[in-house]
Image: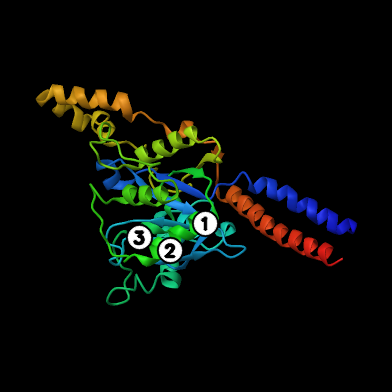
Amino acid sequence: MSRMKSLLLLVYLFFLGAAEMRADAALLLEEPFGNFGAMNPTGHAAVYLSRICAETPTRLRRCIPGEVGVVLSRYHHIAGYDWIAIPLIPYLYAVEQPNEVPKAVDAFTVAFLRDSYRRNHLWEIMPDEAGGQTPKGTWGQLIGAAYDRKIFGFEIETTEAQDDQLISILNSRTNKSRFNLLFRNCADFARGVMNTYYPGALHRSLIADAGITTPKQIAKSIVNYSEHHPELRFSAFITPQVQSTIPRSKVVHGVFESLIKSKKYVLPLAALHPWLASGMFAAYLARGRFNPSHEADGYYDPHQLQQHLLATQLDVKGMEIAGELTSQDTLR
C-alpha cells in the first residue's frame, strides 16, 4: 500500500473514532418564548435523527452521504398534518448552510429568512394566502427555531435497523393532524418516536405533571434511561439562541413547577386551596426537579455545528476511501 493510501486510511480511522462519539437520535428540549410561552412555560419537544432525511416534508428516507439528518416535530394547524420533517440546518436557522447563518438578527430578518425558505421548500403545504400574502399560523416555528429559543439536545445511540423501522412506521401511517394540548401534544409525539427505538424509555409523570406529557419530563426520562444503559453512547448539548433584538426565551418548566414558580398562579391557589398548593409543591420536589443545563457537555453555535457536520462528512468520505483500499488489496 502506498504512503498516500496509508495516510488516507489513517485520516479515515481518525474520523471514524470521532464519529463514534456521535449519537444518532436526539431529543430536542426547546425553551418557551413569547406570550404563549409566558402562559404555558413547558416549551416544545422535537426529535433530530442523523441518518434519516426528508424525501418530502411528510415522507422520510435514509440519508445519502453528505446529508446531516432531519428534525421531526408536531405542531397545531400545519396544513392538516400530524408531523413535519425539516432538515437540521433550516430547522435551526432557516438557511441552507451553516455559513449562511447571520451573526445577529432582528424580527424582520427572521421573518424574511423563514418566508424565503417556505417559498423555496414548503410551498406545496404552505402556499401564499390570497393576494400573495405570507400565510399566518405556527408554520414559522418549524424554521429558524434557534432565533426564538435556546435548545437542549439529548443524544442516544441507535442502529440502522431501528432507523429503517421508524421510516417504515411513519411512512405507512396516515399523517393527519391529531394534536391535543393535553394528550397528543409535541412531547407525546417525541416520546412516541424515541420509544420506537427504545420501548418504554420515555414516559409521562403522573406525579409531577398530572399525567400530561411535557418536554422537560421526557428529557429527564432519556437521561435516566441512559444512566441505566451505559452501553449506549449518550451525550447532551446546548444550541444557544442566536443573538438578536428578539426577546430571549424563558426557562422550561413542568406542569406543577409552572404553577408553584409563578406568583400569579401560586398565590391565589395557596390562599384558596392551601392543601392543593402544598401537594403540588411536594409533587414537584419528589419528581419534578430536573435542570437540563446541568446535563449539557457543551455548546453548538452555528460555527461549531458546521465543524461537527464537516467532520461527519469527512468520515463518510473516509469510509469510501477505506472501502476502495480494501477492494484494491483484495484484487491483488
Most foreground residue, 210 or 226? 226
Q: How is the image coloured?
A: rainbow
N-terminal of the two: label 3 or label 2?
3
Q: Where on the picture, by quarter, is residue 114? A: bottom left
Q: Three-letter amino acid code at disc 3?
A: Trp
In the image, 270: left or right of 162? left
Q: Where on the picture, by quarter, is residue 120? A: bottom left
Most foreground residue, 244 or 198? 198
**Which residue of the protein is positioned furthest toward the right in this rendering?**
2
Mark 1 to mark 2: distance in Å? 11 Å
The residue that mark 3 highlights is 83
Mark 3 to mark 1: distance in Å? 22 Å
Q: Residue at x 43, y 63 (%)?
A: 168
In the image, 226: left or right of 285? right
The residue that mark 2 highlights is 168
Q: Give residue 25's position: percent from left, percent from top.
A: 49, 49
The answer to whether residue 88 is above or below residue 118 is: above
The answer to whether residue 62 is above or below residue 295 is: below
The residue that mark 1 highlights is 161
Q: Residues within 10 Å of mark 2 (few under 14, many from 20)?
A: some
N-terminal of the two: label 3 or label 1?
3
In the image, 271: left or right of 221? left
Q: Is residue 194 visible?
A: yes
Which mark is in front, 3 or 1? 1
Q: Residues within 10 Å of mark 1 (few under 14, many from 20)?
A: few
Q: How many marks?
A: 3
